[in-house]
Image (cartoon, rainbow, N blue to C red):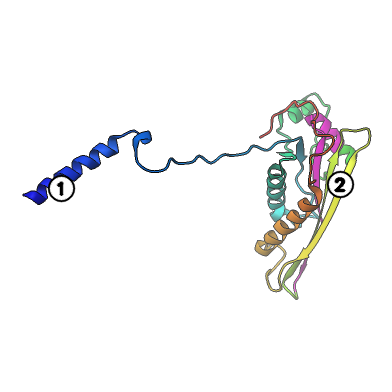
Amino acid sequence: MRALSWALAWCLIASLAGGLPASARIGPPKQKTKTIAPTGPVVLVFPPDTLQGSGDLTTDVVTEVEESRLNASHVYQALAFLRSLPTIKRSLNDATLTNPDVSPPFEDIVKLKKLAQAAGYNFVLSTAFDAYRFDPEKGQIHITLSARLIDFSGEKPKVQSATASGVTPEKSAQHETDVAAARQLVRSLTGQLMDSLLPKTAPASSAPAARRGSVR
């Protein structure tokens, strides 16, 4: 009987404790995770140009790493170039831009400047696969990537360029489109490019052009 009384007493105490407000409960308060939003001028990130289809299955890795590194730098913030951006759609509708203007390749600096001005931003990031070669004897894929971070805010474009090359481990690929290892290599190479391109301090021209679109 005494054991039953103790059990009932403990149940009553537990139910009362469960009904207490969070501020009255025993234990340290939960700390909220603070997310720091990207800051700085917007960089319009263009999809990487490929060589006759080679590298198509890895282009998403390039864009993912570039946008992530730009946002994490707290010097820039990334915006993927899409023809569906409101400012680009408007320019297409009023014939300020044409379909070839908004289609790859994005290697021509005059074309990049035209698109940057239409979007309303000063900075662009353009990337290209300069080499993508499969070696069937060694089962390897050789890749060379290059990138340009271009500032159009002045009278003349300021261009920063970087190149990175590498090869997958031997016997890591059965064919050109066996891209599991290639995707890992592309991720590493893109990281190297961003290490070279990202400044250690905020750029002198830190104010973006008048924004007419919105950052995703």
User: Under tag 1, what secondary structure?
Assistant: helix
Q: Mark 1: which amino acid?
A: Ala
Relative side of 54 to 23, left or right: right
Q: Is residue 131 visible?
A: no
Residue at image point 75% right, 45% down: 47
Q: Residue at the spot x=77%, y=51% of the render?
A: 194
**Viewer-proximal residue, 68 or 7?**
7
| Numbered mark located on residue 7 in the image | 1
Magenta span has 90? Answer: no
Q: Residue furthest left?
A: 1
- Residue 117, image x and y in percent? 83, 30
Q: Which residues are magenta?
A: 112-136
Tell me the kind of residue under disc 2.
Gln
| Discs 1, 2 touching: Cβ within 8 Å | no
Give 169 or 32, whichever is nearer the viewer.
32
Q: Position of residue 184 (x, y in %)?
A: 68, 60
User: Which quadrant of the view contains residue 113?
Assistant: top right
- How many numbered marks have been drawn onto this rendered protein structure? 2
Crowd around label 1: few <14 · some 14–19 · many ≥20 (10 Å): few
C-alpha span from label 1 to label 2: 74 Å
Tell me the element at label 2.
strand
Q: Position of residue 26 (x, y in %)?
A: 35, 41
- Outermost residue toward the top? 94
> Where does label 2 land, which residue?
160
Please report the residue visible at 77 percent of the width from the left and 48 percent of the height from the top. Answer: 48
Q: Is residue 172 depicted above or below 78 in this figure? A: below
Question: Residue placed at 70% from the left, 56% from the top?
Answer: 187
Residue depth check, mark 1 versus mark 2: number of the one nearer the observer: 1
